[in-house]
């Protein structure tokens, strides 16, 4: 069963990654997907990132309350946690829930209302037409979204440290600059691109191959979120081993 699903997924991707038949239509769909899958997620991502950054700073400060430990390590731990794991991985899982369910339900609804069958009858490569703009949109926009998340997470930590008095601005700023590794950003963005690929394609698979009615579309959306999240977690481990070990 799982091998069959993987095979169908691979065959689907082969057709998705063909050249679009009409570039004008592709670019119209692409910019629409940028808005639906990316821009509309900025508010939630910004809100979560800002407050999680504050929480990470407060918890780190509580655990480093020993006066012999330099306060710069609070900022250091915050920026490391946000860049290496929180922004690329947990924000991607949140997007898998929001965007993944939207993609699966949208394509699934088109399937049960026979809109996809109509595209096939007209000779349109429906997989390429429906999925490729979503894939390119997530691959291009999500790295920017994660960079915004990183910035707001660090900013949230700075604000929380100042409001609570747990860490001074000077110490926090020293911490985020202390032993900074530019490759951490590269590592996070590599993970983001891989996760964006799965966020766009796995829900598309479940939506495209759904059968039945509205109830099955709902179940397909749920499965899409579950399997996308599982795939992100598994590949997070694999990429961490390959890039940081």
Image (cartoon, rainbow, N blue to C red):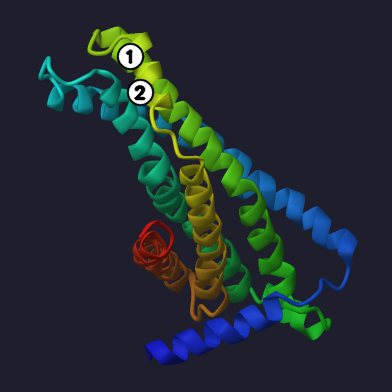
Rendered-image quadrant of the N terminus = bottom left
Label 2: state its secondary structure: helix
In the displayed structure, 42 sits above or below 238; it is: above
Residue 82 picture location, percent across and down: 38, 37
Residue 21 picture location, percent across and down: 86, 73
Residue 55 picture location, percent across and down: 27, 27
Tell me if I can see residue 65 in this picture.
yes
- Left or right, residue 27 beside residue 38: right
Label 1: state its secondary structure: helix
Rendered-image quadrant of the C terminus = bottom left
Q: Quadrant of residue 233?
A: bottom left
Q: Which residue is mark 2?
A: 175
Discs 1, 2 touching: Cβ within 8 Å: yes
Question: Badge 2: few (under 14), some or many (20 or more) residues near its Cα, within 10 Å?
Answer: many
Residue at horizontal 47 percent and vertical 58 percent from the top: 101
Residue at horizontal 49 percent and vertical 79 percent from the top: 212
In the displayed structure, 157 sits above or below 121; it is: above
Q: Quadrant of residue 80?
A: top left
Q: Which label sits on residue 77? A: none
Q: Nearer the viewer, residue 49 or 183?
A: 183
Q: Which residue is mark 1?
A: 171
Q: Nearer the viewer, residue 152 or 205?
A: 152
**Numbered circles on residues, count:** 2
Q: Nearer the viewer, residue 61 or 19?
A: 61
- Left or right, residue 9 beside residue 110: left
């Amino acid at each position: 069963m799982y091998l069959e699903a993987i095979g169908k997924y691979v065959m689907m991707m082969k057709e998705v990654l063909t050249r679009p038949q009409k570039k004008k239509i592709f670019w119209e769909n692409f910019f629409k997907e940028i808005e639906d899958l990316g821009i509309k997620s900025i508010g939630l991502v910004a809100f979560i990132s800002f407050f999680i950054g504050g929480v990470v700073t407060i918890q780190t400060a509580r655990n480093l309350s020993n006066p012999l430990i330099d306060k710069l390590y609070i900022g250091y731990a915050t920026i490391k946690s946000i860049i290496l794991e929180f922004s690329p991985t947990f924000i991607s899982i949140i997007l898998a829930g929001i965007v993944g369910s939207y993609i699966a339900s949208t394509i699934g609804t088109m399937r049960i209302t026979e809109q996809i069958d109509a595209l096939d009858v007209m000779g349109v490569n429906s997989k390429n037409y429906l999925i490729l703009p979503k894939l390119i949109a997530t691959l291009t926009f999500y790295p920017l979204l994660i960079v915004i998340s990183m910035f707001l997470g660090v900013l949230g930590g700075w604000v929380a440290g100042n409001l609570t008095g747990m860490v001074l601005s000077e110490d926090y700023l020293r911490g985020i600059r202390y032993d900074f590794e530019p490759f951490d950003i590269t590592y996070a963005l590599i993970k983001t691109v891989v996760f964006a690929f799965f966020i766009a394609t796995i829900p598309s698979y479940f939506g495209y191959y759904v059968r039945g009615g509205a109830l099955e579309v709902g179940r397909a959306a749920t499965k899409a979120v579950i399997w996308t999240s599982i795939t992100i977690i598994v590949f997070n481990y694999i990429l961490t081993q390959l890039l940081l070990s």
